[in-house]
Image (cartoon, grey):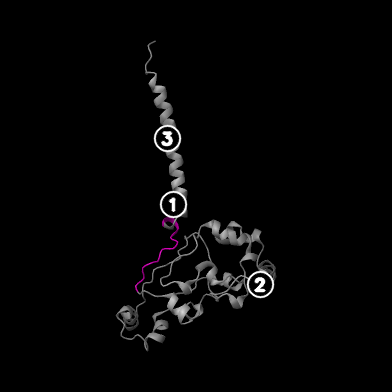
Amino acid sequence: MPQMFPKSANILAGASLLVGLLLLASLTWSGLVYTRSSYGTGTAVAVVQPVPFSHQHHVGVLGIECRYCHTSVEHSSFAGIPPTKTCMNCHSQIWVGSQMLEPVRESYRMDRSLRWQRVYNLPGFVYFDHSVHVQTGIGCSSCHGRVDQMPFTYQVPTLLMEWCLDCHRDPASRLRPREEVFNMKYEVPANQRELGQQLIERYGVRSPSRITSCSACHR
């Protein structure tokens, strides 16, 4: 029986398999890089807001504490977005003619909320409770970074599951006293490991095996 394919067909077939494998590996590598880049995670990207609110000015310069605006953070799963009335507590007296703040004044006049854009946006299948973390001694800056140094707010951590698990597997290295939760300038003490173990007992933090269980965050 005569040969149906030339001998070069074997080389072409081998080359095709090699190129296919290389292409698959490249696509896999590219996907992994993308999911950990700022494009995939949204880290370090300032979100455009209806009003250019500066945490650096309000928190860092004026010293306004987190709870003044985020009133529900200690007892609710949501930190809460301040109503326009909170802004007008000050801005009915200062910067009253600023064009930049006209959307705030219009919101107050029309009794219509400003449409703030989310900076931290977890998937719908992830359950996160602010109050639990605050009550167990997780500082605001641990997740949100030094917002007192941010002219425009951006996401600091990747929010990938591995980032959450790093903390849940070793909570002692992250805990701080409750009275320091809202302190943006808090520095980790030299005896953090010893302090963390004490706070775990004091605040009733569950064991790593329980807080790394799937049902702890996926409900």
Determine if the magenta segment contains residue 47.
yes
What is the C-alpha distance between the residues marked 1 and 2? 38 Å
Split into 4 quadrants, where in the image is the N terminus? top left
How busy is the neighbourhood of tag 1: few (under 14 within 10 Å), some, or many (20 plus)?
few
Residue 89, percent from left and from top:
41, 86
Local secondary structure at mark 2: helix
Q: Quadrant of residue 205?
A: bottom right
Please tell me whether residue 180 is drawn above or below residue 214 in the rendered image: below
Among the two numbered marks 1 and 2 on one chain, the one whose residue lies closer to the N terminus: 1
Going by the numbered disc 3, the residue's amino acid type is Gly
Q: Is residue 204 visible?
A: no
Callout 1 secondary element: helix
Disc 3 crowd, CA 10 A, few/some/many (<14, 14-19, 20+): few
- The outermost residue toward the top is 1
Q: Residue at x 30, y 85 (%)?
A: 97
The residue that mark 3 highlights is: 20
User: Which numbered dot is residue 34?
Assistant: 1
Residue at the spot 63% in from the left edge and 65% down from the top edge: 173
Q: Looking at the image, which residue is at 44% across and 63% down?
A: 44
Badge 2 amino acid:
Tyr
Q: Which badge, 3 or 1, comes first in the chain's sequence? A: 3
Q: What's the magenta region?
A: 39-50
Q: Is residue 72 magenta?
A: no
Q: Residue at x 51, y 57 (%)?
A: 160
Q: Are marks 3 and 1 in contact (CB under 8 Å)?
A: no
Q: Position of residue 103 (x, y in %)?
A: 32, 78
Q: Position of residue 174 (x, y in %)?
A: 61, 66
Q: Secondary structure at mark 3?
A: helix
Q: Residue 190: in sight, yes or no?
A: yes
Could you tell me which quadrant the C terminus lies in? Answer: bottom right
Which residue is the site of mark 2?
Answer: 203
Q: CA distance from mark 3 to mark 1?
A: 21 Å
